[in-house]
Amino acid sequence: MINFDEMKEVGIPNLNNGKGTTKANMFMDSNIKIMKSTLEKGCSIGIHTHNTSCEVVYILSGIAKCTLDGKEEIVKKGECHYCPKGSTHSIENIGEEDLIVFDVVPEQ
């Protein structure tokens, strides 16, 4: 069992040249990265390429602008953003409240 509430939260400033600090509780091993992340209003995770993995981003609260291979999509609470292996994406909190996401990044 992974309990994010019992994990130490880390702050990652300007993740992938994004804006602000991404706060994350993370579980990692050689096969997978599982995270619960918070981006405050105006924060973003900069554009980056998934060369060795895909990423699934489920929105727990807030609203995100996700850019996947140059195409923008708005993703809201209860929806999912998927970045396939080999694709490039970014995530930005465009709402008034914190953007809280659950991320799964399996190595492939």
Image: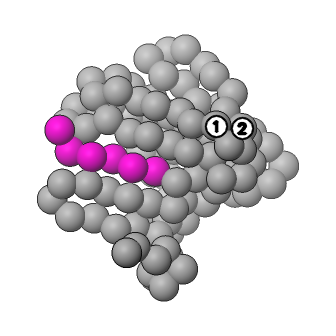
Which disc is residue 17 wearing?
A: none
* Quarter occupied by residue 80: top right
Q: Which residue is mark 2?
A: 76
The colouring scheme, among rainbow, by chain, secondary structure or one colour, is: one colour
Name of the residue lying farthest toward the bottom: 6
Residue 37 can be seen, yes or no: yes
In what element is the residue under mark 2? Answer: strand
Specify the segment rendered in magenta: 103-108
Q: Are marks 2 and 1 in contact (CB under 8 Å)?
A: yes
> Which class describes the residues within 10 Å of circle 1: few (<14), some (14-19), or many (20+)?
few
| Residue in the picture at 64% in, 37% down | 79
Residue 28: horizontal and vertical position, in percent?
28, 64
Residue 32: horizontal and vertical position, in percent?
26, 54
Residue 82: horizontal and vertical position, in percent?
46, 31
| Residue in the picture at 31% in, 57% down | 33
> Which class describes the residues within 10 Å of circle 2: few (<14), some (14-19), or many (20+)?
some
